[in-house]
Amino acid sequence: MRIPLPRPRSLAGQLFAMQAVLIAVVVAGSALFTYVSDRSQAEQAAGRQATSVARSIADSPSVREAIRTPDPSAELQPYALAVVRDTDIDFVTIMDPRGIRWTHPDPDQIGLLFQGHTGPALRGRTFTETYTGTLGPSVRAVTPIRDGDRITGLVSAGIRVEEISQRARGQLTALLAVAAGALGLGAIGTYVINARLRRHTHGMNATELSHMHDYHQAALHAVREGLLMLDGRYRVALINDGGRELLGVTPEEDVVGRSVAELGLPTPLTGALLASEPRVDEVHLTADRVLVVNTSPVTGGQQRGSVVTLRDVTELQSLMGELDSERGFTQALRSQAHEAANRLHTVVSLIELGRAEEAVDFATAELELAQALTDQVVAAVSEPVLAALLLGKTAQANERGVELVVSDDSRLDDGLLPDTLPARDLVTILGNLIDNAVDAAQGGLHPRVTVTARTEEHGSELILRVSDTGPGVDPDHTEAVFQRGFTTKPAGPGGRGLGLALVRQAAGRHGGVLSVTSGDGGGAVFEARLPLRGSTVVESAGGAV
């Protein structure tokens, strides 16, 4: 049977044990230091007290008078015992200059030689020492008794070391009680702090936290979608590699700790990131990308920040635009097939009625009209992608009752466009401008859309101009029409207000400019100018150039 190994202690438990041991060591060290210090101070205080008592006795006139008598012990012994009784001194010994005792707490020691040093006192100096005498170790003071200039005796007053230790032990008991209280409070405080830490670390130990951090970092770098974490003050707390790429933040740029408002993002995107309410699948444009943004607040009793995910749908949006165009072409072809069937029935009916000549004339006129349209477009714009786009859009516009014509000054030869200007971007620019113009012109008295595609005289710039006979653009909205979400039409199932923003984004990627003016006969004129050579890409926070 395999015995399971004990699980390593959690990080909070390790910190608690370390802090408890640290507090115990600090308290024990403080107690030991205080005890040693108090004992030293007690010995010094005992020496000062003994010195004070000894000098008081040596200066007493009655003591000097008793020394002159034939039997000094008879008067000095009761006096010494009274001093011991009235003070905290353990003994008072009065002796002659030779060290023969006149007094002693033990009467049997009177007349015997004093045990200790007397040399400094015989030279007239008071001194203290720790010495082991008949009463055991003691701190004593020895001072001379003077009768004029002559030393007639010596006084020794002392306190036993045992008594000093008892005083220090009494202080130590109180100190230990305070230290135990401090240790208990420290342990309780440490426990409370570590209990909170355990909640934050979910009881995981240091190894588990380290592994989680490694997995966390690996996941952040592996995820291709952008991930942005903001704190409660909308500052960047974390951003992964995908987020840096999608937001245009270089790896060398340190954005952690900076506010979202300082990242130089487009205003609508910044507003979405700063919003307190969640955002779900919102489409936003940067200088060269179409992003789907989702935000979710991180709450735990209070607003702690938000998590932002970013998905790049630039290619998807372009493909959707192409799919919409294909759907339009399909509808136009279906309509044309229906019309062709009607015309074919007309031709057949004329033949059946015996009017073959009229049938030939009718069929010839229809073929000449279709061929004239094709010849007109191809003659003006021989670039195949744009020519196909114009033919398809012409059929779509005609189906919606709008006349789409290519202007006489249009001229765009095949092979003129550089590889740096892909056909997909041209389809995005011109296709959205035409769709917007057809929407504006539809329903008018003489709905018409005019398209101009040409280059400048020296071939350095491509000009795509689309004008319509619609109501035009309010001068106050000439800048707003290029912002994502702006529209004057009812919102459809997929939303509106993205086409012109995508046009400006595509133009901006190639260093081009997009403008709108009012036409001479009314309506709006949208013009995109794209450099064909020697151009540099110009980007701005909002993708507008």
Image (cartoon, helix red, strand yellow):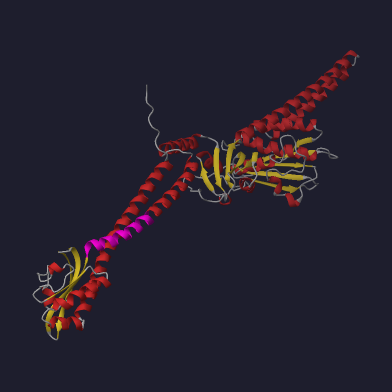
Residue 382 visible within the image: no
Image coordinates of residue 161 in percent, x first then y, are 22, 63
Residue at point 20%, 82% (across, down): 62
Farthest right residue in view: 353
Q: Main secondary structure of the magenta part?
A: helix
Whether the magenta-drawn stretch holds residue 162 is answered as yes
**Of 18 and 435, the residue lying toward us:** 18
Does residue 293 sit above or below 104 in this rendering? above
Nearer to the camera, 283 or 256: 256
Count the marks.
0
Residue 448 located left or right of residue 306: right
The residue furthest bottom is 148
Which residue is found at the position 40% from the left and 54% from the top?
Answer: 181
Q: Is residue 400 magenta?
A: no
Furthest-left residue in this view: 98
Position in image of residue 455 (x %, y %): 65, 41
Can you say whether 7 is above or below 43 in the image?
Answer: above
In the rendered image, the quadrant that contains the N terminus is top left
Q: Is 122 displayed left or right of 10 in the figure?
A: left
Looking at the image, which residue is at 75% across and 26% down? 331
**In this orientation, which residue lies closer to the viewer: 15 or 361?**
15
Residue 286: x %, y % from top left = 60, 43
Measuring from the top left, give residue 249's x and y in whole percent: 52, 45
Image: magenta residue range? 160-179
For residue 98, say whether it is visible: yes
Viewer-side residue, 531 vs 164: 164
| Residue name at image x 67 percent, y 33 percent | 321
